[in-house]
Image (cartoon, grey):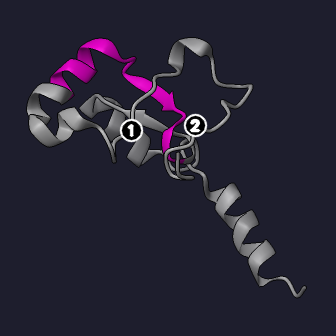
Amino acid sequence: MSDAQALATCPAHVPAALVYDFDIHNDRGLLTDPHERILRLVEEAPPLFWTPRNGGHWMVLKYGDAVRVMRNPDIFSSAPIVAYIVAAWLSPQ
């Protein structure tokens, strides 16, 4: 299993009910019939879920939820993590 395919450890603050194993980059259903796969995903997965694939990340399935996320970067942002990484990268070693 490559690093990209390795499962990330679920953060402690993520409820188990919101964890769904989905790999957007390697899902066969998306390649064969993307419309059917997305419809199935909407039926099976929580509307907002955390996936351990590709380093672990959140996914939003409903349009209204996605709009809310995009319009509220102060709530739904990973900026502090990015800022920390950039600061560490820029600091002299």
Which quadrant of the view contains residue 69? top left
Q: Residue furthest bottom?
A: 92
Location of residue 93 with respect to 17 vertically, above or below = below
Q: Residue at x 77, y 83 (%)?
A: 90
In magenta stretch: residue 43: yes
In the rendered structure, the answer to whether residue 46 lies left or right of residue 62 reads right
User: Can you say which quadrant of the picture contains the C terminus?
Assistant: bottom right
Q: Residue at x 18, y 28 (%)?
A: 37
44 left or right of 83 in image? left
Q: x%, y% of residue 71?
A: 40, 47
Return the x and y of residue 28 as percentages of the image width and height. Answer: 23, 36
Residue 10 among those drawn in magenta:
no
Q: Measured from the top left, where is residue 27 in percent x and y?
A: 29, 37
The secondary structure type at the circle numbered 2 is loop
Number of residue marks: 2
Residue sitting at x 10%, y 32%: 35
In the picture shown, does residue 10 fall above or below 55?
Answer: above
Measured Cα–Cα span from mark 1 to mark 2: 10 Å
Mark 1 = which residue? 23
Q: Position of residue 45 (x, y in %)?
A: 36, 18
Q: Nearer the viewer, residue 8 or 28?
A: 28
| Earlier-in-chain disc, 1 versus 2 | 2
Residue numbers of the magenta segment: 38-54
The amino acid sitting under disc 1 is: Asp
Who's the residue at 39% across and 47% down the image? 70
State the image quarter where residue 34 is shown: top left
Q: Is residue 84 left or right of residue 51?
A: right
Kindly identify which residue carries mark 2. Answer: 7
Residue sitting nearer the eye, 56 or 4: 4
Please, what is the three-letter code of the amino acid marked with disc 2? Leu
